[in-house]
Image (cartoon, rainbow, N blue to C red):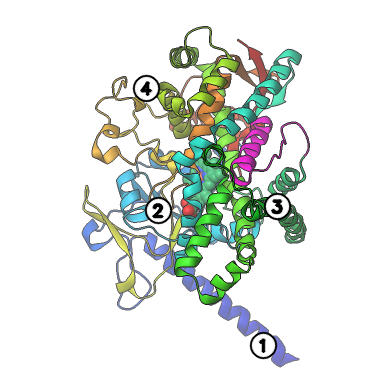
């Protein structure tokens, strides 16, 4: 009995000691002292940096790292704010430069923030592409399945990405523009009804159903039609999103639900079953077509629209024929090859819905919200639509027809593209989180050096966050960073011709879709569909956001450092950069309250 007691006590003491040592080691790194290893090796600062350089916010009690700042940030920002906004405030408040460390261990991650686009591309996403953060991978693997494209690594990711790349190419997506138009016209009808009834509704709810329907049609050739009716795939998927823990990454017990794993598992079974049925329908139709005696004539083949999954299957078969094993080739010939593909395709379809629906739907919401606040931009966009689509008399029907005739016509909408880019700069729905494990052998620690300062920074042991929102607030590239100025993206119209955006260093400064080999596979789709939808609605409608009975008719841009200078709690202020519809963390970064408001005919 006593022996057991002392054994347990010894184990607890050992665990406590190990935790304490780990804590000291991590804090010493940050305190600019020496790494807890032999021989002692400076981590921060690196020999190149000089002894006093500490790219981090100040620590009160070194042992607590930067946890005090987490407390301050949670107080200042409105509840639920997406933590990707935090870096901008810290950088300004403590004059931290373009690279800085924030250590929330053991309650949260140890983050390395990068606000410089060249460093981000060279060392994190493109020159070298670091592995995705395990925090994101664990979560998405449970949410989407282990063969989801966002978190797969190595050869498995490469193969999957190459299979789906052809379907998501701009050239192929252009052939599917008519589908996007038809689905968007349903959205227009629904908006007309809402304008007539003057009802208060959640815009993001409507745009989400629209974008899911588009993904269903483009990827799987499935008519989900969830804008008009309940669809089991969409409802099960949306239920799954509500099961996500709503946490900021600082307090692991936040929004704790003991039964969440079971609920997620049950939901996954149903979702996989439903997506599987839809996929089987598609595979059966394809097989029937392949076996049919009556081959489609050449003209039919040319005009026939092929879903992303068709091109993926072609690529998969090609891949197996050229580099598959004998077993895989035999399975393919016997028809079971498609079955092997099935698991990957189910996870991929869920991934495309997950990664593609609320990112695009939030973007559409924010564009409409901003256009109401900036009448000049709205008018300018309408003028451009008139110019491109045949004059002042063009209406939704004729614009739709023109786009069906010439799928590439949307590429002429230069100002609209700038509006979308500026919206994505201000409200990026996603970003990338990378990670390099801690190294106990100092010779293996990976550093990178900023050529501008000659300073070196360790990467190993940190979650690396070149957050698009932070880079998008870097004034060297984007002067007046809180303001909505679409012209900044058009060289001939920009009020900031000297901004670094127009130098080679600015090439990767706008990065809502990220850069490098792990950039967004759906970026062309997102841009095409957003343009098609906007071309159809901005001339006819005006959306006015409305929170707690207050219409949002005006807004004055303000940077968080000034906005939060009075220290008032975010729960009382409820704005971020002056926006009541600040971004909350719910899968993607989405408008708070799903953007309630009313839509009006112009
Ligand atoms: C405005 C809309 C969108 C934005 C801002 C956006 C943004 C991003 C970002 C930042 C990443 C990198 C994520 C990471 O590194 O962890 C990403 C990856 C990805 N996105 Fe998007 N996305 C959008 C729309 C879409 C759409 C429409 C789809 C598909 C239908 C899609 C599918 C994916 C996939 C599969 C990946 C992982 C790619 C890989 O790792 O190879 N996204 N997206």
**Label 4 neighbour load within 10 Å: few <14, some 14-19, many 20+:** some
Image quarter of the C terminus: top right
> Can residue 84 be seen here?
no
Residue at image location 47% in from the left, 29% down from the top: 420
Disc 1 residue: CB within 8 Å of ligand 1: no
Q: CA distance from mark 2 to mark 4?
A: 29 Å
Given residues 189 and 20, the one toward you in this image is 189
229 in magenta: yes
Q: Is residue 39 left or right of residue 223?
A: left
Would you name the residue on which mark 1 appears? 6
Q: CA distance from mark 1 to mark 2?
A: 54 Å
226 in magenta: yes
Residue at image location 41% in from the left, 41% down from the top: 511
Q: Earlier in the sequence, mark 3 or mark 4?
A: 3
Q: Secondary structure at mark 2?
A: loop
Q: Are marks 1 and 2 in contact (CB under 8 Å)?
A: no
Would you name the residue on which mark 2 appears? 517
Task: Where is residue 389? Give x, y as percent.
Answer: 48, 15
Image mark for residue 487? 4
Task: Name which quarter of the figure residue 541 lies in.
Answer: top right
Q: Earlier in the sequence, mark 4 or mark 1?
A: 1
The mark lying in front, picked from 4 and 1, is 4
Q: CA distance from mark 1 to mark 3?
A: 54 Å
Q: CA distance from mark 3 to mark 4?
A: 42 Å
Would you name the residue on which mark 3 appears? 275
């Amino acid at each position: 009995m006593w022996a057991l007691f002392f054994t347990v006590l010894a184990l607890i003491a050992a665990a406590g000691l190990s935790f304490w040592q780990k804590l000291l080691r991590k804090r010493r790194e940050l305190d600019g002292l020496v790494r807890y290893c032999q021989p002692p090796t400076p981590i921060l600062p690196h020999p190149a940096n000089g002894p006093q350089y500490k790219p981090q916010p100040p620590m009160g009690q070194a042992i607590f790292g930067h946890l005090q700042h987490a407390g301050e940030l949670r107080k200042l920002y409105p509840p639920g704010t997406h933590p990707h906004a935090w870096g901008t405030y810290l950088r300004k408040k403590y004059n931290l430069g373009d690279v800085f460390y924030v250590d929330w261990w053991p309650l949260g991650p140890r983050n390395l923030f990068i606000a410089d686009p060249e460093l981000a591309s060279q060392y994190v996403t493109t020159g070298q592409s670091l592995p995705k953060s395990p925090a994101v991978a664990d979560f998405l693997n449970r949410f989407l399945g282990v063969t989801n494209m966002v978190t797969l690594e190595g050869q498995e990711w490469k193969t999957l990405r190459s299979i789906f790349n052809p379907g998501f190419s701009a050239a192929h997506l252009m052939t599917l523009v008519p589908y996007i138009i038809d689905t968007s016209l349903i959205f227009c009808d629904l908006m007309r009804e809402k304008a007539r009834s003057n009802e208060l509704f959640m815009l993001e709810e409507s745009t989400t159903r629209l974008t899911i329907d588009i993904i269903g049609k483009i990827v799987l050739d499935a008519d989900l039609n969830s804008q008009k009716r309940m669809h089991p795939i969409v409802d099960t998927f949306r239920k799954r999103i509500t099961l996500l823990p709503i946490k900021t990454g600082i307090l692991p017990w936040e929004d704790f639900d003991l039964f969440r794993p079971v609920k997620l598992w049950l939901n996954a079974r149903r979702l996989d079953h439903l997506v599987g049925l839809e996929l089987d329908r598609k595979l059966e139709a394809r097989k029937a077509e392949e076996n049919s005696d009556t081959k489609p004539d050449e003209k039919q083949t040319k005009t026939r629209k092929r879903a992303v999954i068709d091109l993926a299957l072609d690529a998969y078969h090609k891949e197996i024929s050229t580099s598959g094993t004998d077993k895989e080739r035999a399975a393919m010939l016997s028809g079971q090859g498609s079955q092997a593909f099935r698991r990957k395709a189910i996870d991929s379809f869920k991934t495309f819905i997950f990664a593609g629906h609320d990112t695009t739907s939030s973007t559409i919401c924010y564009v409409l919200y901003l256009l109401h606040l900036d009448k000049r931009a709205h008018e300018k966009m309408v003028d451009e639509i008139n110019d491109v689509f045949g004059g002042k008399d063009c209406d939704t029907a004729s614009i739709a027809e023109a786009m069906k005739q010439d799928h590439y016509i949307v590429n002429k909408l230069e100002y609209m593209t700038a509006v979308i880019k500026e919206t994505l700069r201000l409200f990026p729905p996603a970003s990338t989180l990378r990670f390099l494990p801690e190294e106990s052998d100092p010779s293996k620690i990976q550093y990178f050096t900023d050529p501008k300062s000659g300073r070196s920074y360790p990467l190993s042991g940190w979650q690396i966050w070149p957050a698009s929102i932070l880079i998008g607030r870097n004034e060297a590239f984007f002067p007046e960073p809180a303001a909505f100025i679409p012209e900044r993206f058009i060289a001939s119209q920009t009020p900031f011709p000297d901004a670094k955006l127009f130098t080679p260093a600015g090439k990767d400064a706008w990065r809502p879709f990220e850069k490098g080999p792990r950039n967004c596979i759906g970026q062309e789709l997102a841009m095409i569909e957003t343009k098609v939808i906007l071309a159809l609605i901005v001339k006819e409608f005006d959306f006015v956001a409305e929170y707690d009975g207050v219409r949002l008719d005006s807004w004055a841009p303000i940077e968080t450092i000034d906005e939060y200078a009075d220290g008032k709690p975010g729960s009382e202020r409820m704005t971020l950069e002056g926006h009541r519809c600040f971004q909350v963390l719910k899968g993607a970064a989405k408008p708070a309250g799903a953007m309630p408001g009313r839509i009006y005919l112009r």
